[in-house]
Structure formats: structure tokens, C-alpha cells
Amino acid sequence: MAGRCYEDWQVGDRLVHDIRRTVTETDNLLFSTMTHNPQPLHIDAEAARASEFGQILVNGTFTFALMVGLSVGDTTLGTLVANLGYDQLVMPKPVFLGDTLRAETEVHALKDSRSRPDAGIVTFAHRMLNQRDEIVCQCLRTALIRRAAA
């Protein structure tokens, strides 16, 4: 089990996730079509070329999902009961095909669960950076995490 139990976390813990990912045209196209997102900026090279960006923009929900996915192995793999919510999601810079992305996480808050004595609530601050160290996505993820077996 790679994820940590509730007791193993402290506010301020910081993780730099090892896995990096270069975003491909296939990633963007498949994600956009699987989610029925017909935004021309994501799937139409001519429309994207005519935009202020001059090229295809990677679907923002792909970027968000990748950011969370890159964090799972180090945070909640095997210990997650449920994700309770995502807050303060922002995407301050665009992501383009060929960008290489990496994720970092900091523990933002800890709270005992009143309804689940076998679990606690961890709020993670995730952020995704590109190869130029620009933040391209960030959010808070609140997760219900198992406590260590007694």
C-alpha cells in the first residue's frame, strides 16, 4: 500500500511526485471525445490556430484529472475511503500539446471525522507545474482517509 493512513499526515507535509507526464495529442483528443467536449480550442487545429493562443489548448479537465492522478500513488492509494470534494480549482496558465507536467502536494488541513471513527479528513493542496515551472492547475482536495488498524 503506497498511500498513508490518517495518522501518518501532518499539516505542512510536502510531496514532490516522481511521475512526470508529457501531454500528447492523443491524450487530449481521447479525453475530449470521451467526455463529449466539442470545444474547438481542444479538437480543431484550424480553429485553435486562429485563436489568441495560436495552437490547440489541452482540455482543462484533463489537466485537473492528471494532477490528481499523479498524486494518488503517494497520498491515498489503498487508504482512501472517499474523495469528499475539490475546492478553489484554478488554471492560471494554459497547457499545450507537448508540455511536460509534474505535480506537488502539501497537506493543508487535518480533521477528525465525527461520523467515521475509523477515518480522518485530510485536505491536500495539489498543484501542477509545466516544464517552465509555471503553475498550470491547482486545487484543494478533501479526502476521507482510513486510520491505521488498531
Image: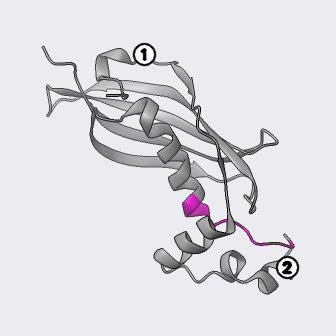
Please report the bounds of the magenta region as a residue range.
54-62
- Picture quarter containing residue 81? top left
Q: Are marks 1 and 2 in contact (CB under 8 Å)?
A: no
Question: 94 above or below 40?
Answer: above
**Residue 112 inside the magenta-drawn segment:** no
Near-viewer residue (23 or 115): 23
- Picture quarter containing residue 16? top right
> Pointer 2: what residue?
49
What predominant SS class does the magenta segment belong to? Answer: loop
Quadrant containing the C terminus is top left
- What's the amino acid at mark 2? Arg
Q: Position of residue 26 (x, y in %)?
A: 62, 69
Q: Position of residue 144 (x, y in %)?
A: 28, 36
- Picture quarter containing residue 135? top right
Q: Which mark is residue 10?
A: 1
Q: Secondary structure at mark 2?
A: helix
Q: Which mark is residue 46?
A: none
Near-viewer residue (9 or 87): 9
Say how the picture is coloured.
one colour
Image-based side of 103 in relation to 33, left or right: right
- What's the amino acid at mark 1? Gln
Q: Earlier in the sequence, mark 1 or mark 2?
A: 1
Image point (82%, 72%), residue name: 55
Q: Position of residue 36 (x, y in %)?
A: 49, 81
